[in-house]
Amino acid sequence: MRWFLAATLGLALLGSGACGDGALRSAGEVCTASSQCAPGLVCDMGMDPHVCAGMGTPPPPPEPDAPPDPGVDADPNAPDADLTQPDAPGSPDAEPPDAEPPDA
């Protein structure tokens, strides 16, 4: 039973030593995660290479998803639409349903 306890303890110590050097990096040192940096520092992923810093680099502003408005507007002297005329000629495509409208 003692050999099992000693083996378990030995494997635990060996495993914890394999997780890295344990020394925390200071500002300006290369990192891959904030857990590698000293307290109060974060791994700035906005830098190339990633380094420990007091705060991260702000992301760039988003690209517009549409081209800028050229400033073209409707002709102010154009006549207004005639609201008494339908938009399209002819009869509607579908007839109203057969059911009576519900009573309110």
Image (spheres, grey):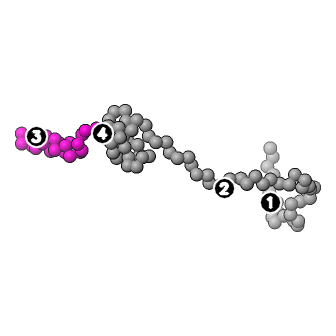
Which is closer to the viewer, label 1 or label 4? Answer: 4
**Which residue in the protein does label 2 denote?**
67
The residue sitting at 86% across, 60% down in the picture is 87
Q: Which range is magenta?
A: 1-24
Which is closer to the viewer, label 1 or label 3? Answer: 3
Indicate the secondary structure of the residue bearing disc 3: helix
Across and down, in percent, residue 19 comes to 23, 45
Mark 1 or 4, nearer chain start: 4
Mark 3 or 4, nearer chain start: 3
Q: Quadrant of residue 36?
A: top left
- Which amino acid does the dot numbered 4 rest on? Arg
Q: Mark 3 and mark 1 in contact (Cβ < 8 Å)?
A: no
Residue 17 shown in magenta? yes
Distance of label 4 from label 2 (alpha carbons): 44 Å
- Which amino acid does the dot numbered 2 rest on? Pro
**Which residue in the protein does label 3 denote?**
5
Q: Quadrant of the C terminus?
A: top right
Q: What is the number of the mark on residue 25? A: 4
